[in-house]
Structure formats: C-alpha cells, structure tokens
Image (cartoon, rainbow, N blue to C red):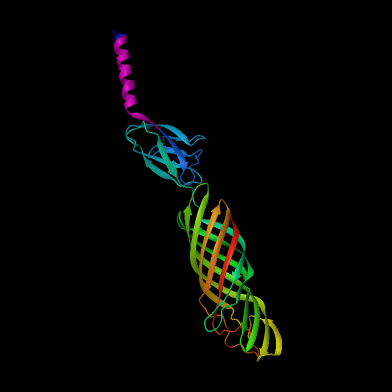
Amino acid sequence: MKRVIIFIACLTACLSLAAQSREVKGVVIYASDSQPVIGAEVKVKGTDIQTVTDVDGKFVLEVPADASKLRVSSIGMETRTVRIPENVEEELLINVRREERIVTPFVQIGVNASRPKGDDGPDASSAQMGFTVGAGVSFAISHHWSITPSVNLSQRTARWENEDYVYVDTKIEPLYLDIPILAELKLWGKNNFKSIISVGPYISFGVGGQYTATNNYQDGALVEQKTYKGDLFGDNAPLKRFDAGIQFGIGWQVKHVYFGFNVQYGLTNIDNKDFTSDTIIIPSEHIHNFKADFSIGYRF
C-alpha cells in the first residue's frame, strides 16, 4: 500500500511539472530570400531559458507554461520578438530581416551621354559620349531609406552644328567634379536582390576642358573659315564653372554589385555672358546641362 501511495505521488508530481511547461518548435528564416538563419539565439523573454537554431534554422525549446514571448537575435539580422501561440502544436515560422549596415562605402564607373539645352538658341545637335568615375557612402536611416552622397569626376561632351548666315561647328569637352546628395528607396527582393530608386540635388564644379569651334562665314558661298580652340573655364571663357540641378536614378543591386541609370538636369545657366570673342562658340546665351549615364559599381 505504501508503494502505491509513493507511485501516485510521483505521478502527480510529474503531471504537475509537465503542466507547468510546454514545448515550442519553430524555424527562423530570412524574409528576403527564405534562407535559414543558422545559430540564431531563441530566448524566452525575461528569462535565461534559451536555445540556438540548427543548420536548417529550426529549434525546439521547453518554455514555462506562462511564457508569452520569444526573443530571436543573431549577428547580421535584426532582433525580433514574437508571441508564443496558445496552440503549441503549431510550428512557429519566424521571418527576420538582415541587418542593414549603417555606413556602406562604394565605388562606381560608367559612361554618359550629354546634350546641353539652350533656352534662347538651339540645343546641342547630338549627344556625345563621356565618362564618369567616382566614390561615395550610403548612410542607412531605415531598412528601406538611405542618404547617399558621392563625389564623381565626369566628362560631359557636346556638339553644336548650326547653319545660318554663320555655320557653327562647336565641340566642347568640359570636365566636372559632381557632388550628388541622393535619397534612396530600396525595394527588397529575393536572393539578395534589390531595386533602388533615387532622387536629390547635385552641384558641380568645372575643373577643366577645352572647346573647338569652326565658323564658316557665308552668304550663298563660302567666304571665310576659321577654327578656334581654348579653355572652357576661366576669367574669359565661354562657360561658368558652377552648375547645380536635380538628379533622378534607378538601379539594381545583386549582393555587392550595383547597376544604375541616372539623369541629371541642370537648373543653372552655365553660359558666361562676360565672355568676349570675335567668333561664335556656342549659339545660345542660356544653357543648361543635361546628362544621362549608365554605371556599374561595387558596394562594400
């Protein structure tokens, strides 16, 4: 009889202990590509009860009966707190985001096509090819938004061909130091892929470049032809050094590699009205820069 009483007491104690805890199962994956998070710490919030996920991102944890939340954390992911369901038979699916780096430096190189716009004269006759090379830093302010300044060296080549009383054939090859400051919206996809939309102001400073102008003075027949060459920027030069405007862009990033298409539209008149010459260099007195470029870059 004594043994029966002891057995019943032990059974009651075991049942009581079992009623005070429950088993929670789950899997932790990245929301962007559904890949498992290996070695993530899964902890009952407010206690020292914890475990880690296996190579498949799965975990099993014995939690107190009154436990209501789990805290999931790991290096490279955002910490997340989830509620424990009342039905512990269900396997928890916990989606987490990769932790965005606050500062991401990058380098880029590309080609551009430039065609300045004339307010009171013709636009450049054709877009000419140039180059862009530079570096910058992206500052993340949230999972989707970043502020991204950069410094780029950009050659913007353009050409005018205008036939009137004076036939003008002018080619300019200005070299600018561009400083765009962009707001970037990141749209996350799968397998570390994201689309990036950007917009913001830019300022530019002309650091060099030359022009070549050929003027044919004519009145039914060729009378005189002259070719002139000179610096584009300076005290007595056809262009102002300072330029400012707005830049729009769209790009795609796969892991660390970035591809982008950008358009710059100048809002300042870059024509130097104080420039004096005995020939026509640019057949317009109000000129705005316009440039489109395609670039490839690496974000560290």
In depth, the one of 204 and 103 nearer the eye is: 204
Instruction: Say above or below: 143 vs 284.
Output: above
Task: Check the picture and name the quadrant holding the C terminus.
Answer: bottom right
**In the rendered view, does 295 fall on the left or right side of 5?**
right
Magenta stretch encompasses residue 10: yes
In the orientation shown, which residue stands out farthest toward the top? 1
Work out whether 169 lies above or below 133: below
Residue 51 versus residue 248 in the image, above or below: above
The residue furthest front is 220
Which residue range is magenta in the image? 3-24
For residue 63, above or below residue 263: above
Image location of residue 281, percent across then percent down: 63, 84
* In the image, residue 117 lies in the stretch drawn in magenta: no
> With 107 as the anchor, is 30 left or right in this view?
left
Indicate left or right for 2 with 137 as reference.
left
Q: Where residue 261 sits in the image (x, y, percent)? A: 55, 62
Q: Nearer the viewer, residue 166 or 276?
A: 166
Residue 131 location in percent, x, y?
64, 67
The structure residue drawn at horizontal position 48% and vertical position 65%, both measured from the top left corner, is 199
Prevailing secondary structure class for the magenta stretch in the rendered image? helix
Mark count: 0
Q: Residue at x 60, y 77 (%)?
A: 125
Q: Quadrant of residue 124?
A: bottom right
Residue 213 visible in the displayed image: yes
In this view, the residue in front, 204 or 164, is 164
Measuring from the top left, give residue 230's x and y in whole percent: 68, 82
The answer to whether residue 101 is visible is no
- If the image is split into quadrants, where does the N terminus sit? top left
- Which residue is painted at 61% across and 87% down in the image? 164
